[in-house]
Image: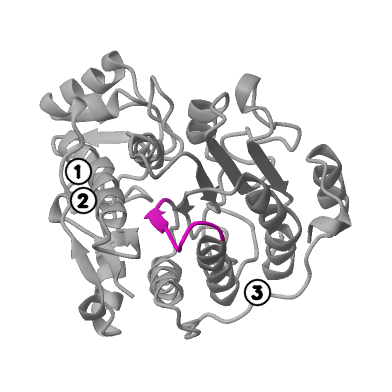
Amino acid sequence: MATGYVYHPIYLEHNLPHHPENARRLERILTLLEEAGMLGRLEAVGPRPATEEELERVHTPAYIERVQRMAERGGGHLDADTYVNDRSYEAAQMAAGGLLAAVEALLAGRIDNGFALIRPPGHHALSDRGMGFCLFNNVAVAACHALTFPQIAWVLIADFDVHHGNGTQAIFDADPHVFYFSTHEYPFYPGTGHWREVGQGEGKGTVLDVPLPAGVGDAGYARVFEELLWPLARRFRPDLILVSAGFDAHWQDPLAMMRLSLAGYARLARELVGMAEELCDGRILFTLEGGYHLDVLAHGVLNTFYALLGEDTISDPLGPAPPGEPDVEPLLDRLKALHSLRASHW
């Protein structure tokens, strides 16, 4: 099995040292992957810049130009949380293009699966504005690109970042060819992702939002995947799975209040890889979103590569969360009723 990874030094040049989303995140990941001997086991996939035409499948020309002009002027802020420096436009082009290159390598058979180690992240970016540390919506651009290939008619986007991917959902809300699934702390930034949201128009039924209360950990997430995602993925039958991988639902993350452990995250990765193997010939690509405890982030990515390689190894130097999780049963029951799931589906 050939597992690919995407990386380019330009990703480190989008940087604001005292901001939570800074270059040290990716530097720590690469250091650990090297120390663990993982990089030598992977197939490097060279990124390319996304073209304006590819970005415009998702973003308005006016917004793309705004990011470009801001970078040319030396930088600034798209909002209070989202910065641009003089290299950010190039980095964001290459981040989106890195995931596009991974899609192309996967569909050409050069890799079987992979992880795009890219930044800036993307899942909050709307069609006409960036927010939440995100400039271009990398996973949305990749999904649109994949759907131009004849072998891909249905794409499942699974988003386990602690924040709801409001940008991704908004872009595909009415698109029946893309199923969007999100687990997220709620109510929490950006305030979207209510359990009643299921998509609109022709896309009705292709959104599964699981807004979890603070404190949910390994047991609650495992139930969500087993009782909701698996049956709905089997119903949708994707040709490709794209994963917005945020590691900020860990119990040590400084920006959130959830209780996943690294072992719990590893289980989610293995579930998704198994889902791809059952439903779409193993075609799955992960892309980096959030995660702001550097060791959690690095070990989370390492464990995801173990899952992609079909191995059971788990690196978890931080151990389990403190005991005690809120009950997710009432939320699961509401979602099962909303999505017409019965016991026979699992």
How much space separates mark 3 and mark 1, taking CA atoms?
Answer: 36 Å
Measuring from the top left, give residue 21's x and y in whole percent: 35, 49
- Identify the image quadrant of the C terminus: bottom right
Task: Name which residue lies at 81% across and 60% down.
Answer: 326
> Which comes sooner in the sequence, label 2 or label 1?
2
Expressed as whole percent of the image width and height from the top left, the position of residue 30 reads: 25, 69
**Label 3 is placed on what type of residue?**
Ala
Q: Quadrant of residue 82?
A: top left
Q: Residues within 10 Å of mark 3 (few under 14, many from 20)?
A: some
Stretch of the chain drawn in magenta? 279-289
Residue 94 marker: 1
* Left/right of residue 257 with respect to residue 345 in the rendered view: left
**CA gap, disc 3 and disc 2:** 32 Å
Marks 2/1 in contact by CB < 8 Å: the verdict is yes
SS at mark 3 in the image? loop
**Which residue position holds label 3?**
321
> Foreground residue, 20 or 68?
68
| Residue at image point 34% right, 23% down | 59
Which of the two discs, 3 and 2, sits closer to the camera? 2
**Location of mark 2 (residue):** 11
Left or right side of 237 for 212: right
Crowdedness of circle 2 by 10 Å Cα count: few (<14), some, many (20+)?
Answer: many
Image point (20%, 80%), residue name? 40
Residue 320 in the image: state x and y as whole percent: 63, 79
Disc 1 residue type (three-letter): Met
Disc 2 secondary structure class: helix
Q: Which mark is residue 178?
A: none
Q: Choose the circle earlier in sequence order: 3 or 1.
A: 1
The numbered mark, 3 or 2, whose residue comes first in the sequence reads 2
Q: Residues within 10 Å of mark 1 (few under 14, many from 20)?
A: many
Q: Looking at numbered disc 2 in the image, what kind of residue is underneath it?
A: Tyr
